[in-house]
Amino acid sequence: MNDSQNKQIAVVTGGSRGIGQIIVQTLSAMGIQVFFNYASSDDTNARNTIKTVEDNGGVCRGIRADITQKDDVDAFFKSVFSQTSGIHILINNAGIRKDGLLAMMKESSWDQVLDTNLKGAYLCTKAVIKPMIRQRWGRIVNISSVVGITGNAGQCNYAAAKAGLIGFTKSIAQEVASRNITANVVAPGFIQTQMTDQMTDQQQQDIISRIPMKRMGESSDIAALVRFLISENAGYITGQVIQVCGGLVM
């Protein structure tokens, strides 16, 4: 698919804030029409995302949907397909954390993290995979974490979900490569977000001291890699895990 000849359609899960919001803005700036979901009943972030995109001449739409629920996912993608000629790009970005040591972790904390971070990617990818096969072109990028590679004390649920996402992506890549569909993983390290902004200065410095580049990353660092991976220039790259972590994990 030639970007200049075809109007591309992208779906970004969890696109109303954080890394997802910057990915939505980045893809929209490329001339891609972007649909994103958000889970909160408060749509303030979603409206702000749409306004920012439209103010910059882009096109996007936010739809409230819980990606852990098949009925919500089916309705979300039915809405997208009814408004477009197809979906060319899927960015599985939505994720949550419910940290705690295993000995004290509630079963609900395990289930909620696995459902959002892994089952949600399964449901969304399944919703687009047959249409992508029929159109013989597609780009799937799943946002994992370096924690899915290294593990991290107090995050066994999050690490399990992010590691599962890596195995899921590699398997999908093998299934659809012959149809000109790529599937890759972006694994961020410590990225400056609303979550890290809530840390104390000392907590932030403790993190930065572990990073060879001596700074946290920005959401734009993740979006820049996503932009490359969905392009024709990345057409021969699939099943890969690319870490964006300032050298934290090598």
Image (cartoon, rainbow, N blue to C red):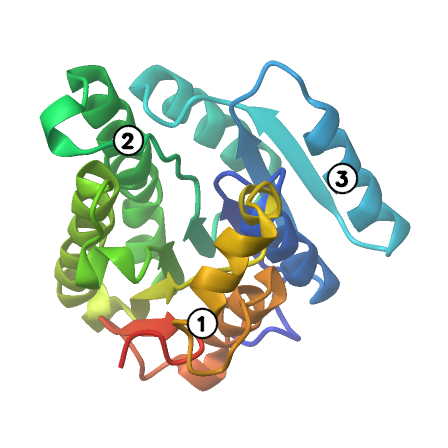
Q: Earlier in the sequence, mark 3 or mark 2?
A: 3
Side of 246 relative to 126 (left or right): right
Asked which secondary structure carries label 2, the reply is helix
Asked which secondary structure carries label 3, the reply is helix
Q: Among all residues in the image, which is located at the extreme right?
A: 55
Q: Earlier in the sequence, mark 2 or mark 1?
A: 2
The location of residue 233, given as percent across then percent down, is 47, 85
Instruction: Check disc 2 and give the amino acid type.
Output: Val
The quadrant holding residue 154 is top left
Separation (CA) of disc 3 from disc 1? 36 Å
Quarter placement of the C terminus: bottom left
Instruction: Check disc 3 and give the amino acid type.
Output: Ile
Frontmost residue, 187 versus 109: 109
Count of numbered circles on the image: 3
Mark 3 or mark 1, whichever is nearer to me: 1
* Residue assigned mark 3: 50
Instruction: Check disc 1 and give the amino acid type.
Output: Ser
Identify the residue at horizontal 16%, vertical 49% (top origin): 164
Picture disc at residue 113: 2
* Residue assigned mark 1: 209
The quadrant holding residue 118 is top left
Q: Name above or below for residue 53 compared with residue 221.
A: above
